């Protein structure tokens, strides 16, 4: 196995170093060597000592030796690993039929109606795909058709997907992934970047205005601003709210549309509402969804204002073989069932508040923790060399992540310098899980922070 980190993975947070393979247990070495021989390019493993899981439940994963890990990282199993209601719904549908959207499916129509009912009434059309990348690809395609523009504005370290189109405006993919000449960047909404005497709304509006002006100077009309409503790759910035109204107004004045990427922030993850954009008092033109939508079954979605999407539909054929087929739709409907029946949003709100309060108490005197921030069950802990300078400390962040993994609690890192702990558990994370996380984190913080 190559013992050097590839250029593509050099910035990847918390990645396994293949040069350390010989330090792993024998069975892991063998499996990783076999994996390297047969898998295609670009794959990576996480943690200094990778881990293999064989089962899961709620916010817990079980390794091959029966050890219980607290999962504070994986957002794909939105309502919990192996949730029985979702598993039963998928199994039942698999024994019945799996047809696509070219056939009449009452279940598909019912699911679309239920999902759209969670959105403002202006957003009333749903297209279904398989991944967040596909959803964002379609969203931008429609935005270009509607506006006649090509220009895209994203935050400086955004991630929106892996198709060629979407990778062109996902700067977090690194130097090996070319960015489009039609792409411009703005700051994530970090209040610390605001000049004295200004406001975050003014700062963000000025950023967008400057990006639009630069696009126009280079011959690009604005098509869309697309933001992840938790700014998860930029370092997790959920508060304060309110600035997006001025930003969206600036985008609309330039003839563009606003796309809210809810792949990571949606489905009640931020606690206060079903969708992250709602917290800002704006209604996007397009909303994209992905990973958590089917609790592990591939399904994603794009929700449109009809005035944005209808002309595209009259002129362009769109079909996705698996998007909207019976089995993913069954999974999606089952996720909505669980969100409603288990009052998940309230649990997220309570668990998230307790988690952030506990983290702030543990780190309040640490010279190495700049900030604990986030909303609901999306939390960032920014680790620095010194609170005064805010110089990032990626090495210390990696040590904290791997110390937690050694104690069987999973999390990862994020941000341009990968120095912000990313705490993003399944929404099954309850009060007992919060207690276990905080007790473990306190042990690690005592030694590291």
Image (tube, rainbow, N blue to C red):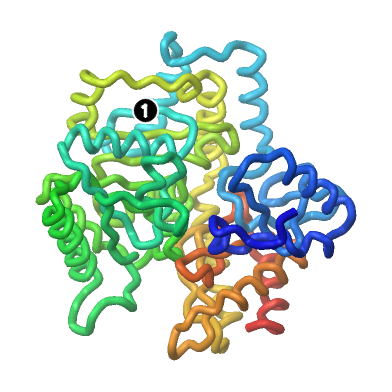
Considering the image in quadrants, where does the C terminus appear? bottom right
What x and y, as percent, mark residue 16?
A: 69, 60
Q: Is residue 216 visible to us here?
A: yes
Q: Is residue 64 above or below residue 138?
A: below
What x and y, as percent, mark residue 441?
A: 67, 73
What x and y, as percent, mark residue 49?
A: 76, 61
Where, by quadrant of the figure, is residue 96 drawn? top right
Residue lying furthest top in this view? 103
Q: Which residue is mark 1?
A: 127
Instruction: Return the residue nearer the eye: 132 or 26.
Output: 26
Q: Is residue 268 above or below residue 300?
A: below
Instruction: Return the residue nearer the eye: 31 or 448.
Output: 31
Q: Is residue 277 visible to us here?
A: no
Where, by quadrant of the figure, is residue 302 drawn? top left
Residue at the image position 66 percent from the left and 30 percent from the top: 87
Q: Is residue 154 above or below residue 55?
A: below
Residue at the image position 31 percent from the left and 66 percent from the top: 187
Tally the numbered discs: 1
Instruction: Return the residue nearer the eye: 418 or 327.
Output: 418
Residue at the image position 44 percent from the left and 14 percent from the top: 106
Residue at the image position 30 percent from the left and 39 percent from the top: 140
What x and y, as percent, mark residue 406?
A: 77, 66
In what element is the residue under mark 1?
Answer: strand
Q: Dot 1: within a 10 Å radius of its alpha carbon, few (fewer than 14), some, or many (20 or more) residues? A: many
């Amino acid at each position: 196995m190559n013992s050097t980190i590839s250029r593509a993975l050099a910035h990847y947070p918390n990645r396994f170093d293949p040069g350390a393979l010989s330090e792993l247990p024998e069975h892991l070495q063998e499996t990783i060597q076999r994996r390297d021989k047969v898998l295609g390019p670009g794959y990576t493993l996480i943690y200094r000592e990778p881990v293999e899981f064989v089962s899961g439940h709620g916010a817990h994963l079980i390794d091959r030796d029966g050890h219980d890990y607290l999962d504070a990282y994986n957002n794909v199993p939105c309502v919990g690993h192996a949730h029985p209601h979702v598993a039963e719904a998928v199994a039942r549908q698999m024994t019945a039929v799996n047809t696509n959207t070219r056939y009449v499916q009452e279940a598909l129509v019912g699911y679309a109606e239920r999902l759209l009912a969670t959105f403002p009434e202006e957003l009333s059309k749903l297209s279904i795909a398989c991944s967040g990348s596909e959803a964002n690809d379609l969203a931008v395609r429609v935005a270009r058709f509607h506006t006649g523009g090509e220009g895209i504005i994203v935050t400086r370290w955004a991630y929106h997907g892996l198709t060629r189109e979407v990778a062109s405006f996902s700067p977090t993919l690194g130097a090996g992934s070319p960015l489009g000449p039609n792409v411009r960047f703005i700051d994530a909404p970090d209040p610390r970047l605001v000049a004295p005497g200004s406001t975050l709304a003014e700062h963000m509006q000025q950023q967008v205005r400057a990006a639009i002006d630069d696009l126009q100077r280079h011959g690009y009309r604005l098509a869309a601003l697309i933001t992840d409503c938790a700014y998860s790759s930029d370092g997790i910035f959920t508060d304060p709210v309110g600035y997006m109204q001025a930003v969206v107004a600036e985008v609309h004045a330039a003839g563009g549309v606003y796309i809210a990427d809810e792949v990571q922030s949606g489905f009640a993850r931020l606690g206060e509402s079903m969708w992250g954009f709602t917290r800002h008092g704006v209604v996007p033109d397009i909303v994209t969804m992905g990973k958590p939508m089917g609790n592990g079954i591939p399904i994603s979605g794009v929700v449109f204002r009809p005035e944005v999407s209808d002309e595209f539909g009259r002129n362009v054929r769109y079909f996705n073989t698996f998007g909207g087929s019976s089995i993913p739709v069954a999974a999606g409907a089952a996720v909505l069932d669980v969100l409603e029946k288990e009052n998940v949003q309230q649990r997220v709100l309570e668990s998230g508040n307790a988690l952030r309060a506990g983290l702030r108490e543990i780190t309040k005197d640490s010279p190495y923790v700049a900030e604990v921030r986030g909303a609901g069950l999306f939390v960032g802990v920014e680790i620095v060399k010194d609170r005064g300078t805010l110089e990032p400390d990626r090495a210390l962040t990696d040590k904290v992540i791997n110390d937690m993994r050694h104690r069987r609690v999973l999390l990862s890192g994020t941000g341009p310098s990968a120095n912000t702990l990313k705490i993003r558990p399944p929404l099954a994370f309850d009060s007992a899980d919060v207690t276990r996380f905080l007790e473990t984190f306190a042990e690690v913080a005592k030694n590291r922070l």
